[in-house]
Image: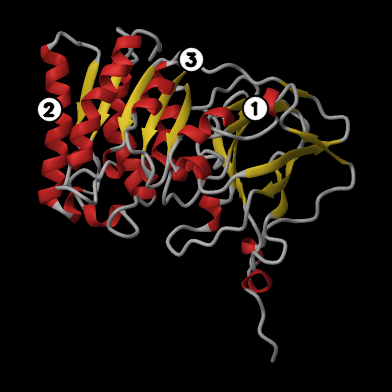
Amino acid sequence: MEPRSLQEIDSNFANSAAIPKDSIFYDVLTSPFHIDGFYDPYSIKKFCRLPPEFLPACNQGVQELAWHTAGGRVRFATDSPWIAVAVQLRRVVHMSHMPCTGHSGIDLYGGPAGTNVGEQEFCHTFFPPDPLLPNGAQYNGIYHFLENRSIMREITLHLPLYNGLEKLYVGVQAGAVIQAPIRYRLEKPVLFYGSSITQGGCASRPGNSYINYLSRWLNFNYICLGFSGSAKGEQNMAQYIASLDLSAVIMDYDHNAYDTNGPDGTNLAATHYPFYQILRQKHPDMPILMISKPDYDSNPVSGRVRRDIILKSYLRGRENGDNQLWFIDGQSLFQARDRGSCTVDGTHPNDLGFYRMAETIYPYLKEALRSTIDHG
């Protein structure tokens, strides 16, 4: 008997059904689609989280990872009874501890016309077929809404966390309306700067990163500058972030500020307060949140050393009169019960870990943004 694929045995694991012949595809880098989380995508016609001309001044990791679409979103409204995608990835990715739904998949959230991002519900994940080769860098998929009728809906697509996009096309029924989405309650972005955890490793799908939870719960636009292994706290990165018009900055780069040639915390201590100073000098009233790494249990001694460096930055800032500064102890992020169930490898959060991180950070960020977000 010939072996059968899992998709043949259980159709629920099939990637997609056939796309209707009357589908019309549109490049999302055109109006009226809204693209969030990238540097000027409509002008450069690329999905890059940093200005391409800035990349040569960055470390090698950032030069590659800036092309990963972590935190990127495509938003629009349509009355099509289905949504299809045609995706050309930057490369084929194999990760032993993160599913392709997370590193290369696209999450679809939707809701009736007028619903904001927090009211939209998860509908579907588009993801590459298995096996990934030889055509794994290209895939398509379709989702039929349960109502299967032409009513206006708000749509959000959360883009891959650990891969880049060369092209993304959205398909709708011929004759369907496509229009601009409703605005975020807070359009001026909140920026997250940090490590692989900030980038979203290892969420099972893009919508489950802790940043996406927070964005939905508080209805704000954001920029994710999470760079796996490469967020070193360099001054030129601080200067770039300080040049942006932002609602808040979350400094979450503890994990990457290590120094292999010195004692634990050497580079973190050398960069953390100066990074904060650069931000504060340019933005005297902008909320800044400082977070230490969540996987405290994997090395409590190191965790204490590094947490205390960040706490010292916070206390120094507060002593200098900064009342727009918050500190979140990373040891609290996974909360108390079943902390060991919050990661896939002792370091990178799984979906439970990201959810608990978002729950813990939420009240701090809500307070920090209280003057600009109506919390109802």
Q: Which residue is mark 1?
A: 41
As measured in the structure, the alpha-carbon distance from the residue carrying label 2 to the one carrying label 3 is 29 Å
**Which disc, if any, is residue 188?**
3
**Which disc, if any, is residue 312?**
2
Q: Position of residue 278 (x, y in %)?
A: 31, 18
Q: Is residue 106 left or right of residue 313?
A: right
Judged from this view, the residue extending furthest toward the bottom is: 1
Disc 2, SS: helix
As measured in the structure, the alpha-carbon distance from the residue carrying label 2 to the one carrying label 1 is 38 Å
Q: Amino acid at mark 3?
A: Lys
- Nearer-the-camera pick, 310 or 58: 58
- Local crowd at mark 2 within 10 Å, few (<14), some, or many (≥20)? some
For marks 2 and 1 on the same chain, the one whose residue lies earlier in the sequence: 1
Q: Position of residue 222 (x, y in %)?
A: 47, 25
Could you tell me which residue is drawn at 17 percent across and 52 percent down?
297
The image quarter containing residue 313 is: top left
Could you tell me which residue is drawn at 70 percent across and 48 percent down?
88
Q: Nearer the viewer, mark 2 or mark 3?
A: 2
Q: Amino acid at mark 1?
A: Pro
Disc 3, SS: strand
Q: Amino acid at mark 2?
A: Lys
